[in-house]
Amino acid sequence: MSPRPRPPSSAAGSAPDDLVDEVAGPPFVPSEAAAAIALGLLALLITGLMGLLLATLAEEGRLSAPGIGLTAMLEALTTGLVTAAAGIVLRPVRLRTIAAIAAVVLVALDLATTRTSGQGVMIVRALAGLPEGVLLWISIGFISRTATPERWAAVLFTGMGLTQLAVAAALSAVILPRFGANGGYVAVAVGAALALPVAFFIPRSLGDVAAAGAPSSGAPPFRGWVALAGTLCMAASLTAVAVYVVPLAGQAGLSVAVGRTAISVGLACQMAGGALATAVAGRVRYITVFWVCAAVFAATWATYAVHAPAWLFVAMTGLAGMAAFVAGPFLVPMTVEADPSRRAAMQSGAVQLLAGAFGPLLASFAVTNQNVHGVLILGVALQGAGLAIAVMLHRVLQTDRARAAIPG
């Protein structure tokens, strides 16, 4: 099937009001933009629910405490690897067919999870990361080709907060107490099934990345990889701690219900964070955002380390959720500054998913069934490393621009 023609960009390079400007080719029509974002939301739905679902599997005796981190790691790892590999080696064509096939496979694997335990859970969830990665690759391809990728990334993050909050609330209040983990994964399968009708509205193909003639695929340059390393560390610190919120609540002397409430509040506050990121995109430097959010994360993890009252535990989880969704979209302009060809930006989402594997993997070695506080030390170390990389990279790029501005 040949791609459907889309209206051309204006001579000035900006699209009409009813279109979404694209730096790589013709602008996207609103239905294509909405479908591409929706596909990303469905691909990422599970990321905000892992803490609830895996903790429930552990409560049912179907998974150990270290297994929580390993399972989250495997699913995020396969998702991120597929997204990254697709961005490097695949041409973004016949996307509607690809998305439909991926959705069917994902539904089947979500349902298969209900019949597994122990290593079986790990295997099935690792396989589920494959179609999730394909769906996310399509969504990230759209975002990386827009004229303001940080704004569209913030839209995706805000939508993630809304959808994950709604599903997490339903899981915590109704599905998990009544139907257990199996009911939760059936609900996730229903969400994955929605990608089928959405697939018919996404762009059939995407244009080449228009930056000095750069192709739509290929590996980023060295500085792009450095920016992605900073992305990996900062995002991994968050995912490492996030999957252990419920056990951390238990170690603080709080109930499972408090831990689940904290996760739901964190997801609710993520919406506010995404909206705030959308509003300040293009107005605030990413390095400033990183410093402020790092301070919030440190305060939250310090609260987790003590026997804080339930209201404080929940409130700090909400604040950290908001900070996570403020910082997340600003990882994109960091990669664009480091690599104007935007090849690194196309990998940003994949690396954040790989961080969802890297963080829980390291966390699984830092916790035991009796004590999970080691994940807090890990979180601080990873966040500090990522922030140091971002600061160093920003200063180097500033120095290079200053030197280039000097005549001769």
Image (spheres, rainbow, N blue to C red):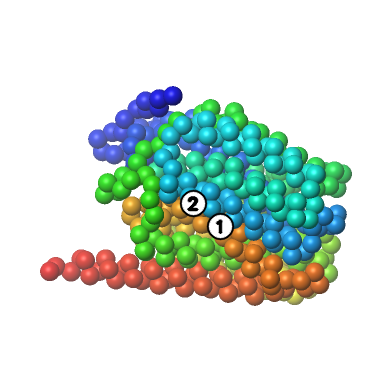
User: Which quadrant holds the C terminus?
Assistant: bottom left
Q: Which mark is residue 354?
A: 1
At 51% across and 37% down in the image, what residue appears? 36
At 79% across and 44% down in the image, what residue appears? 114
Instruction: Measure the alpha-carbon separation of dots 2 and 1.
Output: 9 Å
Residue 356 rendering spot, x and y as whole percentages: 60, 58
* Residue 153 visible, this angle: no
Residue 46 rendering spot, x and y as whole percentages: 66, 48
| Residue type at numbered disc 1 | Leu
Task: Name the foreground residue: 50 vs 357.
Answer: 357
Left/right placement of residue 22 relative to residue 188 reads: left
Residue 57 rendering spot, x and y as whole percentages: 80, 54
As helix, strand or loop, the secondary structure at mark 1 comes to helix
Dividing the picture into quadrants, the one containing residue 14 is top left
Task: Name the foreground residue: 22 vs 135.
Answer: 135
Would you call the spot at circle 2 few (<14 residues within 10 Å), some (14-19), or many (20 or more)?
A: many
As helix, strand or loop, the secondary structure at mark 2 comes to helix
| Residue where numbered disc 2 is placed | 84
**Tag count:** 2
| Residue type at numbered disc 2 | Ala
Please say if 237 is above or below 340. Answer: below
